[in-house]
Image (tube, rainbow, N blue to C red):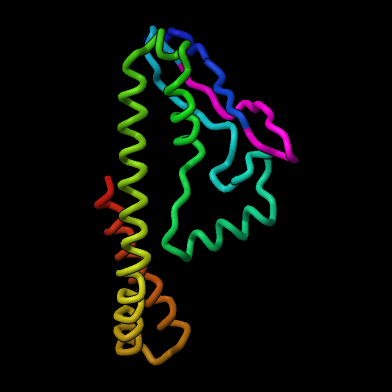
Amino acid sequence: MDGDPINWIVIRDEKYSNGQNETVNIGAVGIINASACTVVSFFDDDDFEMEGKVTTKDKIFAAVESVLPVHTRSAMAHVMDVAKSNLQIMSIDPTFIQWAAEFSHLEIQDALLDAAYKEYLRRSVSSVAGALASKISSNIFLRYIIKKGMEDVVKSAFDSMKN
């Protein structure tokens, strides 16, 4: 399998822009030996309008999304959803639809866990970490570092539950 080439199938999707529909290349599915092996997106997850660059408006939306318990689909999840209906891929690898469904399930599960953490646990963890940091040090800079370190440890532990 080391020498087998990857054949790429470009995935195209309709996009509504400037009052008209246009078809854009959004990603590709890599095929080796009649089996889908990889999916790539041509867009960044933060490029919400799929124009090929992350604009200031995209950055603002990403910042709001990081604070609020909302979750948008990743660019790769969008490519996989569109690719599920691609007849060329289905004729080469009929199991791709199951792989894409499993990926979508994991994407939804991660979104629910992220929302639960942001909505219910983040504030509590921050309060407890701040109280513990103030008991450990009287220096405001050290307290901030300790608090953020504790928050990161809890978030990392929570994220490890997703895998």
Query: Going 73% across and 39% down the picture, which residue do you hit?
Result: 19
The number of numbered discs placed on residues in the rendered structure image is 0
| Left or right side of 62 for 122 | left
Quarter where residue 49 is shown: top right
Residue farthest along the left direction in this orientation: 161
Query: Going 59% across and 32% down the picture, which residue do you hit?
Result: 42
Query: Going 32% across and 41% down the picture, which residue do you hit?
Result: 106
Residue farthest along the bottom direction in this orientation: 138
Residue farthest along the right direction in this orientation: 18
Where does residue 25 sit, x and y in percent of width and height?
62, 26
Quarter where residue 99 is shown: top left
Is 5 in front, or is 11?
11
Quadrant into which the C terminus falls: top left
| Left or right side of 8 for 33 | left
| Left or right side of 143 for 153 | left
Where does residue 120 sit, x and y in percent of width and height?
31, 69
Is 116 in front, or is 162?
116
Highlighted magenta segment, given as a residue range: 15-30
Look at the image and say whether residue 36 sits in the magenta stretch: no
Where does residue 61 sit, x and y in percent of width and height?
58, 57
Residue 46 to residue 69: above or below: above
The main secondary structure of the magenta stretch is strand
Residue 141 to residue 26: above or below: below
Residue farthest along the front direction in this orientation: 19
Where does residue 54 sit, x and y in percent of width and height?
66, 48
Quadrant into which the N terminus falls: top left
